[in-house]
Amino acid sequence: MAKRFATLEKIEHNRKITREMDEPFLYRLQSGLLLALKEQGRLDQVQYHHAQDRLDRQHREWIHKHMQKGEYP
């Protein structure tokens, strides 16, 4: 089975990524990394679900915090 790799072709509008401003992006990135680690066999099913559950909880807390401030996340 051939290994699949992603490559970075270019960076546009380079800026610092922060949890406060870029939570949705970071959530998707981290979820993708967890799934890749599971597919590579570096995480078993239990480890993957535990990590994804924690990540989901962090994301829900971020959304709740912004909703309380009256902000649309």
Image (tube, grey):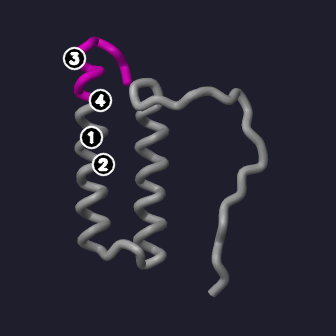
Q: Give the farthest residue toward the bottom.
A: 1
The residue type indicated by label 2 comes to: Leu
Please state the horizontal and vertical placement of residue 28, each as a whole percent of the image.
45, 46
In this rendering, the label closer to the viewer, 1 or 4: 1
Q: As shown in the figure, which amino acid type bears the numbered disc 1?
A: Gln
x 39%, y 25%: residue? 20
* 2 or 4: mark nearer the eye: 2
Quote the CA–CA distance across marks 4 and 3.
9 Å
> Would you place residue 18 above or below residue 68 in this image?
below
Left or right: where 9 falls relative to 27: right
Residue 24 located left or right of residue 13 = left
**What amino acid does circle 3 point to?**
Gln
Disc 3, SS: helix
Cβ–Cβ below 8 Å for labels 2 and 4? no
Give the residue number, with chain letter if any, for mark 4. Answer: 63
Which element type, helix, strand or loop, lies under badge 2?
helix
Residue 41 x %, y %? 42, 78
- Could you tell me residue 5's position as x and y percent? 66, 67
Q: What residue is pinned by disc 1? A: 58
Separation of residues labelled 3 and 1 (CA atoms): 15 Å
Whether residues under marks 2 and 1 lie with C-beta atoms below 8 angstroms apart, the answer is yes
Measuring 73% from the left and 38% from the top, which residue is drawn there? 11
The disc placed on residue 1 is: none
The image quarter containing residue 37 is bottom left
| Residue that badge 2 annotates | 55
Does the magenta-highlighted stretch encompass residue 43? no
Residue beneath the point at 43% across and 64% down: 35
